Amino acid sequence: MTIAIAFILLCLPAISHAQTATEEDDRRFWDVWNAYIVELVEQELSTPDPWEPLNRKIFAFNDFADRYALTPVAKGYQWITPDPVEAGIGNMFSNLLEVTTILNDLLQLKFGQAASDTGRFLLNSTVGLLGLFDVATPIGLEKHEEDFGQTLGYWGVGPGPYIVVPIFGSYTVRDGLGAYIDTYSDYVTNIDHIPTRNQLWLMRNIDKRAGLFAAEELITGDRYAFIRDAYLQRREYLVNDGVVVDSFGEEDWDDDWDEESWDE
């Protein structure tokens, strides 16, 4: 009995050491695991296009459909429509979207801008004959662009990953959700008569596509990357109301022009 007790007492330090080693191994494992997860999350957040392989496939489909379906129709529309008429149609569709802008002005607490945009909408809808003529801009009522994606950005919601949606094109996760919410304030998508709604929706997109031909000439290099970067930069510009922080060259300036450089 005495020998057994002595044996147990001798084993206790070894058992305790084994348990301590196991706890340290477990703690080390979870530290490594947590660091790995944090790195993945940071990498995901720092990469605007983590779904690029899938996005490129959808982009290729959209580009094919645009090139062989929408572009010929838009060019035909532009060719047969006199410039004043084309401008009037564009003004009318733009005027209908003022309701969305006004609502998002209010959601962003931009009450002065909301008042200006309301005046613009009322003036163009009456004197401008349902928006065919833009009579508000010449008298100083500037046009603004606000949507629910911008509203989410105003309140601190990040853009999320870049996505390409079949037919509809470029979005971020935030702006895709915002675009869906904006359909509730879009007059065209809320028309009950389905043929009329579809015709106006198609007409609006043809007119919009015709207006992009000039900008399309600026595309160089990788078409997918160019359009993606242009979209993301424009959205950032709109969310920040044109205030863009330019950090270009800051690191080089700090590295190359420190105090020692001046002393030399």
Image (cartoon, rainbow, N blue to C red):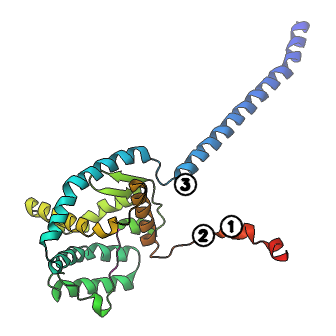
The residue shown at (17%, 70%) is: 78
> Considering only vertical position in the picture, is 169 above or below 96?
above
Mark positioned earlier in the residue sequence (3 or 1): 3
Q: Position of residue 59 (x, y in %)?
A: 34, 50
Q: Position of residue 27 (x, y in %)?
A: 71, 36
Horizontal side, residue 104 vs residue 233: left or right: left
The label shown at residue 247 is 2
> How many labels sit on residues?
3
Q: Which mark is residue 252?
A: 1
Q: Amino acid at mark 3?
A: Ser
Q: Mark 3 vs mark 2: which is more N-terminal?
A: 3
Sooner in the amino-acid sequence: mark 2 or mark 1: 2
Tell me the residue that label 3 is attached to. 46
Task: List x then y, in percent, for residue 81.
Answer: 13, 73
Q: Secondary structure at mark 3?
A: helix
> Residue 6: which quarter of the image?
top right
Front disc: 3 or 2: 2
Q: Of residues 72 and 93, which is closer to you in this image?
A: 72
Compute the Cα span from label 3 to label 2: 17 Å
Alpha carbon separation for disc pair 3 and 1: 22 Å
| Mark 3 residue crowding within 10 angstroms, few (<14) / some (14–19) / many (20+) | few
Of 19 and 152, the residue lying toward us:
152
**Is residue 154 visible in the rendered structure shown here?**
yes
Residue shown at the point (41%, 78%) measured from the top left: 109
